[in-house]
Image (spheres, rainbow, N blue to C red):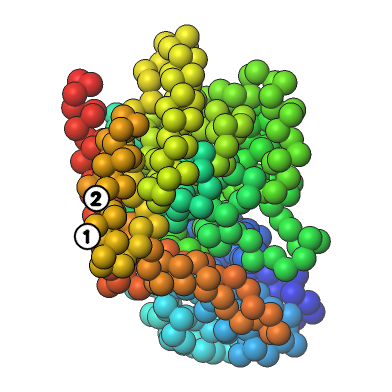
């Protein structure tokens, strides 16, 4: 087979030779799949996968120009596998063929021998793992169809209280328990979008979020969630993310003058209710239209707070805002937002503070009428460093934030989010049982 360029490697070799060789039918492979700054030439989904978020046990195929040396591309391929949680990969230039499992080279051969004595040997390498993993569902067994999609908003009108940290690590912990998760970032600061690993571009020209972000889902009746959702790279298993962008602040006035937009996100989520167990919404530290949209969309509310005086005083605004939202929800014949509690976060680990000051601050917070979580998220180095991770690509440091569970799973911070997640699940279960 004579191949002259990368396009012919993709078309003549991958599509017409390799994929049929693997027994992959057209509905199982996708070409030019984008996850943030990562572009996969080909993605082969396992049988039983419920959505593109189910990447473990999937296969990626990267095609290179016939004159390219494959070894120069292995490091990037391994990064793709690691960040997306993909188990299998094939790298080929039309002359050579490399098969990897979990970033380890399993087999290498010349593609020219694919149709003679090598074909059986390649089948022996590829078929057992591919067939084994494609047969059972790679994600946890689907929950019953009658299950409820739970929407949780993380909100406080005071900034710097740990909203982004809460959203990212709560999502990662729930994902590890087998739940299907969607994060929605409604804050124009886009801190959660960054923390989810979706802002790896280095210049404005490379910005691939400006034309596809949460604003477009809210603004247009024709843009579906599936059109905009990305796969975060901050956790394993990966989590889907509806990203934000700094341009949201420019469009706020348009949404204020478009009444239908306030409930559009809620209506669109109802159409994908069977795809997700939990939707977690990050919000701006304000009382603007995006905060209103989050509150009109949500079922539950978590209020993170560092318990400092300004944060506690801001709870008055949260209480008033919540009352206004509940009044509007009542006109829509919807139940009020159920507050899961006030979450102490970014709390000092100083022993004297924990012994003397923390109890007083907790008591002071209770006067605003919110139940306080038993769980406490302390301010620790591991938690901060996890979101500051980078990878080196050429001469550049590319952001590679991680959840604390992926960065240091045995850390105290990881344990604190495990405890928080258990408490959240228990509170939701108790609330739903009372509603029966």
Q: Is residue 347 left or right of residue 268?
A: left
Q: How many residues crowd around disc 1 within 10 Å: few (fewer than 14), some, or many (20 or more)?
A: few
Residue linked to disc 2: 359
Q: Quadrant of residue 55?
A: bottom left
Circle number at residue 355 = 1
Q: How many marks?
A: 2
In the rendered image, residue 274, in percent from the top left (x then y), is placed at: 40, 35
Label 1's element? helix
In the rendered image, residue 214, in percent from the top left (x then y), is placed at: 62, 41
Q: How many residues crowd around disc 2 within 10 Å: few (fewer than 14), some, or many (20 or more)?
A: few
Position of the C terminus, as image quadrant, is: top left
Residue at 69 percent of width and 80 percent of height: 396
Residue at 51 percent of width and 52 percent of height: 160
Q: CA distance from mark 1 to mark 2?
A: 7 Å
Foreground residue among 229 and 183:
183
On screen, 266 above or below 155? above
Asked whether the beta carbons under mark 1 and mark 2 sit within 8 Å of each other, the answer is yes
């Amino acid at each position: 087979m004579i191949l002259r360029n990368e396009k012919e490697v993709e078309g003549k070799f991958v599509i017409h030779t390799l994929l049929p060789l693997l027994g992959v039918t057209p509905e199982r492979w996708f070409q030019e799949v984008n996850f943030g700054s990562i572009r996969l030439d080909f993605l082969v989904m396992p049988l039983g996968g419920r959505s593109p978020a189910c990447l473990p046990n999937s296969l990626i195929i990267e095609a290179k120009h016939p004159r390219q040396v494959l070894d120069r591309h292995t490091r990037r391929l391994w990064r793709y596998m690691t960040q997306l949680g993909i188990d299998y990969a094939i790298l080929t230039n039309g002359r050579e063929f490399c098969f990897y499992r979990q970033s380890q080279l399993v087999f290498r051969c010349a593609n020219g021998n694919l149709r003679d004595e090598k074909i059986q040997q390649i089948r022996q390498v590829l078929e057992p793992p591919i067939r084994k993993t494609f047969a059972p569902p790679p994600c946890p067994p689907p929950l019953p169809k009658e299950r409820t999609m739970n929407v949780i908003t993380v909100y406080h009108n005071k900034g710097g209280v740990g909203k982004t940290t809460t959203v990212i690590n709560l999502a990662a912990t729930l994902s590890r328990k087998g739940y299907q998760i969607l994060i929605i970032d409604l804050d124009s600061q886009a801190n959660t979008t960054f923390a989810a690993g979706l802002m790896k571009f280095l210049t404005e020209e490379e910005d691939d979020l400006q034309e596809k972000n949460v604003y477009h889902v809210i603004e247009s009746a024709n843009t579906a969630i599936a059109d905009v959702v990305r796969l975060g790279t901050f956790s394993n298993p990966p989590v889907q993310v509806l990203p934000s962008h700094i341009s949201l602040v420019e469009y706020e006035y348009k949404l204020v003058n478009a009444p239908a937009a306030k409930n559009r996100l809620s209506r669109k989520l109802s159409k994908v209710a069977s795809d997700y167990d939990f939707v977690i919404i990050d919000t701006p530290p304000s009382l603007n239209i995006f905060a209103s949209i989050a509150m009109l969309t949500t079922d539950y509310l978590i209020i993170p707070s560092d318990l400092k005086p300004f944060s506690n005083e801001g709870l008055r605004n949260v209480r008033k805002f919540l009352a206004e939202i509940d009044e509007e929800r009542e006109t829509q014949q919807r139940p009020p937002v159920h507050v899961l509690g006030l979450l102490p976060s970014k709390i000092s680990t100083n022993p004297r503070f924990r012994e003397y000051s923390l109890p007083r601050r907790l008591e002071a917070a209770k006067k605003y009428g919110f139940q306080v979580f038993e769980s406490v998220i302390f301010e620790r180095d591991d938690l901060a460093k996890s979101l500051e991770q980078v990878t080196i690509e050429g001469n550049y440091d590319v952001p590679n934030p991680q959840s604390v569970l992926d960065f240091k799973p045995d850390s105290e911070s990881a344990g604190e989010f495990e405890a928080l997640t258990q408490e959240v699940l228990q509170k939701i279960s108790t609330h739903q049982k009372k509603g029966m």
